Amino acid sequence: MTNETIPPHFELHTNDFENDFIWGVSTAAYQIEGGHTIHDKGESIWDRFVSQKGSIFREQHGEIACDFYHRYESDIELMKAMNIPNFRFSLSWSRLMPQGDGASSQAGIDFYNRVIDYCLKCGITPWITIYHWDLPQNLEDKGGWTNRDIIGWFEGYVRLCARHFGDRVKHWMVLNEPMVFTGAGHFLGVHAPGRKGLKNFLPAVHHAALCQSAGGRILRVEVTDAIIGTTFSCSQITPRTKTKKDIHAARKADALLNRLFIEPSLGLGYPKDIKILQRIEKFQRPEDAKDLVFDFDFIGIQNYTREVVRHSYTTPYLRAKIVKATNRNVQTTLMDWEVYPPSIYAMIAKFNTYKNVKKIIITENGSAFQDSIVEGKVHDPQRLAYLQHYLKEVHRAKNEGFKISGYFAWTFTDNFEWAEGYRPRFGLVYVDFKNQKRIVKSSGKWYSEFLRPLFDQASNEKKEKTDVSTGFD
Ligand code: FCB
């Protein structure tokens, strides 16, 4: 696929998927909301991390971001105008519970009530992620994810979310990509809270895995008709060569990047392929084996790229190394991630093989490319081609009978891309961060045309209902 390719005959329609296939867009609180100190909102680890010199591209931060806190109505209206029927967003823990445990914030609860009610008013179904990486700083000060007490703190927070929003919100995801917030945030130190090394990573992994299932159990009790999932980052892993060493390295990378959190939740325990993971035992209590398990209604998988992996003597613990896409002469995005549509198919196929996975939903997929405004328009052929090619692969998986039942594009508007700041733009809608103006990109226009039949179908059904009742009156 070359940079400019748009499939010449892109003949995919929403009716090629099942009628109840779910379509939407995904966002996360810290990346869009802004309002970082409004009312009594507490500080989160991301509020703190961005203030540390050298952590973020050009010292950028999410203090205003897309100002979704104030602009949620017009953004949700735009979503509606774009025929998008499902909106996945996350709740900010420190907005709802400023200190992470104890007192809740009425202003925070009111804000999410307004967002939820406005979605429903616009006919958009809200999908909530409970935790998308912004731990309250007060909890981090007590050890955060490395402290086993996080289970109790998290349970309290989940209960609060369920009790306040569960009457109207029926679709829930417990965690967003635990592998990323433990790996980038607790091993590499490149994401908040900036912790490093195995001594932080291993307990964070185990406690996140326990919270993943504990959160599911609380939602099950509190919102009896909830559809409950959690989300995992995943990438197809290809060994660089067919040598035994590279194949072995690829297997270890797969265990770490793709299997670490799903397998304990299914009762399979942590993958045994990586010796170092056995040290998690140190943090395990006898009752944990069963507590790690939860019967999720769906698994959210988030796929952007694939990784090529080789053996490496010099990489500690893993002896495996990712071969950078920029050294492989392949098309890449602004994140330096390879554009590789078959990866999404491979990941659906992989998660499909787990017997106890009931449903798979793509809860994130998208791309960042350089955008520019020309005569008031943003033409983004590369993002459009990416979206279409990846959707074709999702359709292929669907056609082959895999349990794939939804697709959420990452993301609605350009936003704050964590350590990369505002440089990589992933949105279907362009944001001019100087004045917060929104411009729907050509990819966004295409997605809304693609989704239009759903909208027409929904309004016809509504009309039929009205016609019927008029007929009987
Ligand atoms: C995922 C994150 C999401 C966004 C995309 C590009 O790993 O869940 O918040 O940053 O990557």
Image (tube, rainbow, N blue to C red):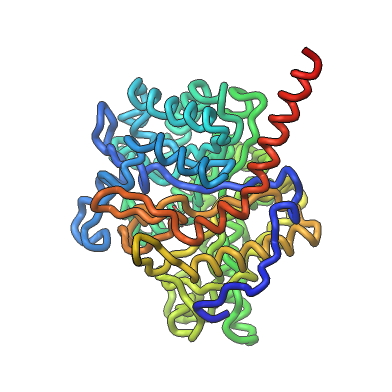
Q: How many marks?
A: 0
Residue 199 appears anywhere in the view: no
Spot occupied by residue 191 in the image (x, y as percentages of width and height): 35, 56
- Ligand 1 is found in which quarter of the picture? bottom left
Spot occupied by residue 237 in the image (x, y as percentages of width and height): 59, 72
The residue lying furthest to the top in this view is: 473
The residue lying furthest to the left in this view is: 53
Q: Nearer the viewer, residue 216 or 6?
A: 6
Q: Residue at x 47, y 75 (%)?
A: 332
Residue 26 appears anywhere in the view: yes
Spot occupied by residue 38 in the image (x, y as percentages of width and height): 25, 32
Q: Nearer the viewer, residue 440 or 361?
A: 440
Q: Would residue 341 be found to the left or right of residue 190 on screen?
A: right
Q: Residue at x 50, y 74 (%)?
A: 338
Q: Would residue 164 be found to the left or right of residue 107 on screen?
A: right
In the displayed structure, 311 sits above or below 409; it is below
Q: Nearer the viewer, residue 127 or 9?
A: 9
Q: Residue at x 56, y 55 (%)?
A: 447
Find residue 70 and report its image quarter: top left
Q: Residue at x 40, y 58 (%)?
A: 184
In the displayed structure, 72 sits above or below 239; it is above
Quadrant of the image containing the C terminus: top right
Find residue 316 and report its image quarter: bottom left
Spot occupied by residue 177 in the image (x, y as percentages of width and height): 50, 51
Quadrant of the image containing the N terminus: bottom right
Q: Nearer the viewer, residue 356 or 7?
A: 7
In the displayed structure, 244 sits above or below 341; it is below
